[in-house]
Structures are given as structure tokens and as C-alpha cells.
Amino acid sequence: MESDFIALDGVEKVFDVRRRTGRLRREKTRVRAVDGISFTVPRGEMVGYIGPNGAGKSTTIKMLTGILTPSGGRVRVAGIDPARERTRLARHIGVVFGQRTTLWWDLPLRDSYRLMHRMYRIPDDRFKANMARCVEQLDLGELLDVPVRQLSLGQRMRGDIAAALLHDPEVLYLDEPTIGLDVISKAKVRDFLRDLNAERGTTVLLTTHDLTDIEQLCKRVMVIDHGRLVYDGALAGLHEVGESERTLVVDLERELPPVEVAGARVLKVEGPRQWLAFPASVSAAPLVAAVAQRYPLVDLSVREPDIEAVIAKMYADRSAL
Amino acid sequence: MLWASGHGAGGGACLGLATRGFGLGARTSRKTGAVGVRVYAVVAAGGFRRYATYRVATAAGVFTNTVFGFIVAYTFTALWDERPQLGGYDLSQAVTYVWIGQALLMTTAMMGGGFENELMERIRTGDIAIDLYRPADLQLFWLASDLGRAAFHLLGRGVVPMALGALAFDLALPADPLVWVAFLCAVALGVVVSFAIRFLVALSAFWLLDGAGVAQITWLVGLFFSGMVLPLTLFPGGLGALAQVLPWSALLQIPADVLLGKHTGWGLVQAYGFQLGWAAVLLTAGRLLQSVATRRVVVQGG
């Protein structure tokens, strides 16, 4: 159970969408929001789960919380079938939706925590200890008596994260936890999550559009598109899968016609400077050697593809299929 | 218009709530156990304080209730001068009825405006999703919250207009404290019936996405059939008989008649039985609808 703490096996979710096609006519179309996804997450891992809008991320999260029943396949979280035993599972998981709040809007933050205390039947001493920890690490001390509606987005988000953690969940699902936050608030949230994972071994599944979140927090990333898992592995490995290219920028002694070497193509020529693209999966050394041997080289630099471009390219490629 | 609003705690009030896994969960909840009673106590207290937060709105509401109370009381005075004993009430009972109506208007939410707008909004935006993964029951959660609200409205919006009405008019208020207790019980049952109706209305948003139309029709129907416009005993024949057996009469007509001493002894038991019966039927209907609806929780806004 430790290695497949969260386990999905061939999970599908099909929605019937009715569309009006005429005055009275309606057409039923089936949408495969999640189309056969399998993965496991061991206990204590922090995984990024990314994909374009409408890829099926939220649907997956909803099946993992038990509020949606899969159309096919098998889901287990902490050994529990979420859709069947949603209430039992609720005590093991914490959920934060960046764009929604679980807090009592008109009342001071403290009141929402009191509600969590009773709702999850948290023993008094644990509640006190967890409150103290969250208040300190998420810097909530001065906010406890402020009505939630008066909190800034960043403050509210920190409040929501604390609310999701008071009952010591073993798994935390985060859906866009840094959306709309300023740089400082983002850093605070990330630091907190990193500590949470390191100190308490909480398993974290993080959905985000902000790839910096992933780069800073997750060693492993899963990419979903059109309901299918298109990548599952280390963040660095995305480059190879994405067929991305690195760029070699060479400064020559003078203006020359485009460089001709095997394994690279010229992207751009600007005076004595030329840009050469080559596959990210191969070493730059032979290419540099070849150029240096045949051309009067003054200076050079290698540019890594940025991860956002890689993923954007992945999405685009799949859409074209 | 005979009624006045001015409640403040609408807005985007958000609170996560929850349901036990319904449908499938009816089976599992027994195994996992329901949430303790204490969570609902906290929810009710929260419901009370949420409304208590808006003091200016409350003051404005009290003012409006009082003004309308005066207007309607004078109208009724004129009417009862012409037709004494209309509907079985004498003049002072009729005027008392007016002030009870003003005091209970918000409490039993005859014109709606309680949790249902918020719940419909959560269904429309998909925020209901967060409410569903928590270990508490959706219907009980909102019931607790609405009872808290009603308690606040009874104190905050009911007591002052009633007291001012009693100063200005000769009201037929009972001296026997037991009658007041009986009245409060009838009010509590009225709140539950009112809740059960509004819960059904709110859940319609699962199918309609925008339940505002249904809500408006229900409020109009509710205002009329609760007896807020005129006591139901005034309506002749079939309409009167129908009005008195519909659930809305539990909201005002019955509590008012209890306070006016129209239901005593076995009659009081029957009145409570009527309210309890409707509460049971409507709450059960809400429960069934909830189990169908939660299976429908679809991805509103991914």
C-alpha cells in the first residue's frame, strides 16, 4: 500500500452532454473527460499533475475525492474506494481548490477552523497543535479574527490551506493553489508545502498552470491531455519526450553564410551571430567541435528549452493528431 | 407590498458543507458513522452570527418591518371596523396577527432569502463540489445553518417590531407563559417546514442551473399561502380549505393561531402534527432529491 498509496487503473469518466441541435431536437454526445488513466503515487511523494484547460485534471481530482464516480477502471486512495466510501475517505484527505473557498465568508477565520474541529472530530490536543503550527508557518496570527471576506487573495489561500490540514490528512490535493497570488505569497505557500511534505510525509498531488510551482516542488510530473496521460516521469525528462530542441548560439569572426553542420539547422542569422537548433536529447559537444573546426568561432552559448515551451509544444502536437 | 426585506448576509457567503456519500453512501454512512451533533451546533451558531454581523442591515430591516406593521395594522383596523369578526378574529386579534406576521416574516423566511440563494449559487458555480467531499450531511448542514439564521431573525427582526406594535396598539397577547412556549415550538416547526421547501427549491438548480425563477414563484406562492397577505381563515370555500392544508400555512397561520389561543389542548397537538407531517414529507422529498442530485454533480467549470 505504501508504493501504491494512490492508485488508478484504467480509469475512465464519460459524460453525456446534450446539445441543442434544432428547435426541439437534442443530440447526445459522449465526452470522454478521462480516457483510461493509470498511475500510482507512493506515500510521501509530491507529484505535479498538469495539462491544458479541459484536459481532465479536475475530473481526475474529483474522482480521487469520491465526488465523481468513475465510468470505468479502479481508483484507490489509502486503500479506500473513494466513490463508495466518500465519508471515510474524507478523514484521510485534504483538498484545496485555488478558485474556491471552504471558509465561512462572513465570519472570522477562526470560526471556520472551529467548524473543521467539529466536522472532522479532531481531538482537542491535536487541533491545538495543528492550529499553532499552521498559524506560525502560514503567518495567520493576525488574521484569525478578521472576517474572511476582508482577507486578500493570498491571505485567504493560506487560510484555506490551513483549513485543509487541521485534521492531519495523509493526502493533500491542491488545485491551482498559487493562482492569482503575488510573488511573495506564492513563495510562502511553496515553502509551506515543501516543509509539510518533508516533515510530515504528506502525499501531495498538485495541479497547476504555474510551472514554477512544479519546478520548485515536484520531482515527478504527470502530464494529461485529452483525458490521457501523455507523460509520467521526472521533470527533466519532459524535454526528450517533448522532442524539444536546444539552441546553440555562435558568434563568428565575421558575417558568413549559414553554418552547415550535421545534426543541426540554422534558425536565424544576424550579422556574425547565428542560432542553431539541435535535439535536446543529444550532447552539444560534438556539434560545438564541428563548428569550431570549420568556422572562425569567437564565442558560443547553449540555451536550454524552457519547460513551458516544451509543454506547450506537447499540447500542440497532440491536438494536431 | 406588505412585507419588507433588508437582510444583509446574502452576498457570496461561502461555507463548505458536505454530504455523506448519498446514493451509494446511504449504505456506507452506517459503517462510517454520522458526524457528531457538535458540528451542527457549530454550524447553527455560525448561521446566527453570520446574520448578526450585519447590524445596519438589521436595524434597517427592523425599521421597515415596523413601518409596514403600522400600515397594515391601520388597514386591518379599517377592514375589521366594517366587518367585525372577519375570519373569526376580533379587531385586537387581527392587529396582533399583523405584528406576528412582521415578527415572523424573516424568521420563517416567508419571502425566502435565506440559505437557498447561496446554495443555488454554489450549485451554479460548481462550488458545491467542495461541499461534497466533507464528512457532513448536506441537508442537515444547511438545516442547522438555517435554524441559526432563524434564531437570529426572531431576536433581531422579531422582538423589536412586536414590542413597538404592542406599545402602539391594543394587542391580544397571552399572559400565560406556556402559550408563549407553545408559540415558539410552532415557530420552530414552521422554520423547519420553510427550510424543507426552500431546500427543494435550491436543489432544482442542479437541473435548471439558474433556479431564480423557481425561487421567485415559490416566494410569491409562499407569501400568499403562509397567510402573510391576509389570514387564511378569510378566504372562502375551496380556496380557504386548500390554503389551510398547504405546507405554507405552517409558516405563519399556525404559529399565529397558537399565540392567539386558537389551538389548545388536542387542537394544539393536531396543529403540531400538521407541521410535523409536512416537515417529514418535505424533508424526505429533499433527501431523495439530494441523492439523485449528488449523483449528477457534473463538472460545472471543470
Image: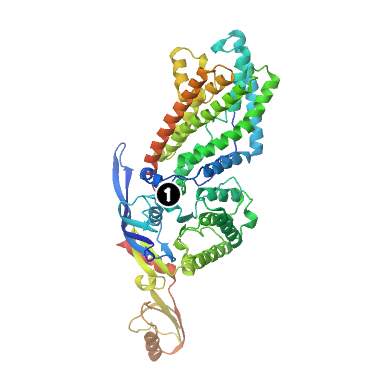
Q: What is the x, y in percent for residue A138?
A: 58, 60
The residue sitting at the bottom extreme is A293
- Is A193 on the left or on the right of A229, as rendered? right
- Is A181 on the left or on the right of A24, as rendered? right
Q: Can residue B111 be seen in this view?
A: no
Q: Which chain carries label 1?
A: A
Could you say whether the residue bearing mark 1 is in a helix, strand or loop?
A: helix
Q: What is the x, y in percent for residue A206?
A: 45, 61
| Residue name at image x 68 percent, y 25 percent | B163
Q: What is the x, y in percent for residue A259?
A: 38, 83
Give the quadrant of residue B201.
Answer: top left
- Between residue A43 and residue A244, name the one nearer to us: A43
Give the quadrant of residue A19.
Answer: top left
Amino acid at the residue labelled 1: Thr
| Residue name at image x 43 percent, y 38 percent | B203
Tell me if residue B123 comes above or below residue A38 in the rendering: above
| Residue name at image x 53 percent, y 34 percent | B113
Tell me if residue A4 comes above or below residue A89 in the rendering: below
Q: Can residue A159 be seen in this view?
A: yes
